[in-house]
Image (cartoon, rainbow, N blue to C red):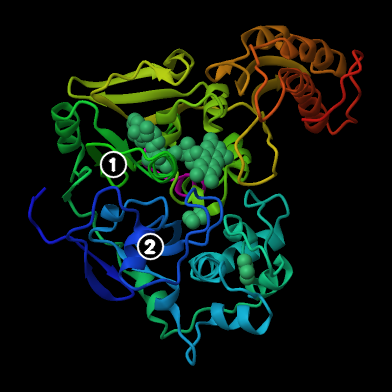
Amino acid sequence: MTPGRRLSATVNGENLSLAGTDPSTNALDWLRAQGLTGAKEGCAEGECGACAVMLARADTGSGTEWTALNACLLPAAALDGQEVVTAEGLGAPGRLHPVQRELAVRGGSQCGYCTPGFVCSMAAEYYRGDRSATRDDTAADAAHPRRHECGPNGFELDALSGNLCRCTGYRPIRDAAFALGEPADHDPIARRRAGPPPAAAATWLEGPTGTYARPADLGEALDLLAAHPGAVLVAGSTDWGVDVNLRGSRAPFVIGIDRLPELRHLAVGDDVVEIGAALSLTEVERGLAGRVPLLDQLVPQFASRLIRNGATIGGNLGTASPIGDLLPALLALEAAVVLVGAGGEREVALADYFTGYRRTLRCADEMVRAVRIPVPLSGTTAFHKVAKRRFDDISSVAVAFALDVAGGVVRRARIGLGGVAATPIRAYTTEAALEGQPWTAETAHAAADVLHGEGTPLDDHRASADYRRAVLGTALLRLHAESTAGPVVEAPTGRGVGA
Ligand SMILES: Cc1cc2nc3c(=O)[nH]c(=O)nc-3n(C[C@H](O)[C@H](O)[C@H](O)COP(=O)(O)OP(=O)(O)OC[C@H]3O[C@@H](n4cnc5c(N)ncnc54)[C@H](O)[C@@H]3O)c2cc1C
Ligand code: FES
Ligand code: FES
């Protein structure tokens, strides 16, 4: 890191200085202060997408993928050395970008407040390198792991799941998305994808509220963590950004770890799948390409594409929230957490990792480097998330199943639960009730009664304790019905199937 280096970002092809920016300033406020007022603040908490912009990020190979992100959540300092495209950089009146033109001619914009955000999310999907391949795959194979609703042009509608519009109605917006063709050969934004993404710049930004530092590598990051007890690690900033914007949180020292190469590794081996802590959920989904079916079932239910483009696995573990969605799934997969600190690396079984409400075995001078999932994986898996809204909502209850059924008998059962205790938990008693039993409706009913009693659910604004228990009981019946393609039979106790 070189304190004093001129910090800057390339925005719409122009180099703009970040000097004088406070580390607590978000990218949206910084862009608007540069006169780029297309991106708007609707909520400042990642829910509306009015602030969406595109960043040049790594694709699954050696090229660049234009990635839409919520600028309201990103620290402006994290843009140092990065390339950003806003709605202004795509087109302007008289020379509209294809996305802007389709939205305009199909009536996809009324008051226009949400439109620059929609334009950026839609443009990122327009430029997705394998969009045509998605179209061909989904046409050929209805069971393809990419189950997101797709247009005839391969446009995944899920790309817009983080954008809200209060006045137009979504049909004309969808019509615009599905009418898009392929980028022209001479389109400079499309051509940019062939080159590597910008390297992560080592950054040091001091301001009145504190310091933002982006170390160049893991060793430097650990030195900073040791030297600044109480420093906040920030990866995708989808949790931290909300804390800063809505709760007024300020940290004297922030360490940006989302670009650390040592935390961005994905490896699928014969015995283990290792996923780097700083990979976003979108990167994990695309990198695994369906090879861990339980995660593939979970990902579309996690927030929105905009959030998943930033949110990392390490951040979900870092919050240690009892309603973090990845945690029950990783418990069912019997994952281990790889922690790294000044004293070296250690591996902890996730089932032993949580020690209390938002407390874990991680020491203050450690960070999560990766998670490891043992292979082979169980054959019968499911992730049931119950939330108030289908998309972009936090779980009231989450249940993850990983069962091995052979010869009609449950040989092994692993069940992770979220939202029913102070920490994510394993449903050990239910697992024992299933193992060695025939995988029949009777077994499912008997085990569902056991599952109904797991955890210590509470009443809160999301759901009552009774509702949470009912959801647990019925989740297993649904799993049985879906895995055997049989009917969902009402439990003898009278509890319905609502999971
Ligand atoms: C609109 C919205 C919807 C959401 N929906 C969901 C949802 O459906 N399901 C869900 O589970 N969550 C949801 N979240 C929460 C959030 O997106 C996730 O918790 C996400 O995984 C956090 O990752 P991040 O990289 O953004 O974390 P950050 O915000 O960067 O960090 C979060 C915490 O983790 C710590 N941390 C980050 N990386 C590490 C590391 N490698 N080692 C140790 N500590 C680390 C940080 O210090 C911080 O305390 C939502 C958030 C928003 C704003
Ligand atoms: S302002 Fe609503 S998501 Fe950023
Ligand atoms: S056009 Fe008004 S909010 Fe979308």
Residue positioned 61% across, 59% down in the render? 164
| Rendered position, 333 above or below 161 | above
Outermost residue to the bottom? 94
Regarding residue 291, the answer to whether it shows in the image is: no
Identify which amino acid the numbered label 2 is placed on: Leu
Q: CA distance from mark 2 to mark 1?
A: 17 Å
Residue 338 placement: quadrant: top left
Residue 55 numbered mark, or none: 2
Identify which amino acid the numbered label 1 is placed on: Ile
Residue 280 placement: quadrant: top left
170 on left or right of 37: right
Local packing at callout 2 (Cα closer than 10 Å; few below 14, some 14-19, many 20+) is many
- Residue 399 location (% of width, % of height): 66, 26
Sequence-first tag of 2 and 1: 2
Q: Tell whether label 1 touches label 2 (CB within 8 Å).
A: no
Depth order, front residue of 165/340: 165
Residue range highlighted in magenta: 276-285
- The answer to whether the beta carbon of the residue marked 1 is less than 8 Å from any atom of ligand 1 is yes
Depth order, front residue of 381/365: 365
163 on left or right of 405: left
Q: How many marks?
A: 2
SS label for mark 2: strand
| Rendered position, 282 above or below 10 | above
Residue positioned 60% across, 34% down in the render? 294
- The answer to whether the beta carbon of the residue marked 2 is less than 8 Å from any atom of ligand 1 is no
Residue 257 numbered mark, or none: 1
- Residue 122 location (% of width, % of height): 55, 68
362 on left or right of 453: left
Local packing at callout 1 (Cα closer than 10 Å; few below 14, some 14-19, many 20+) is many
345 on left or right of 84: left
SS label for mark 1: loop
Q: Is residue 280 magenta?
A: yes
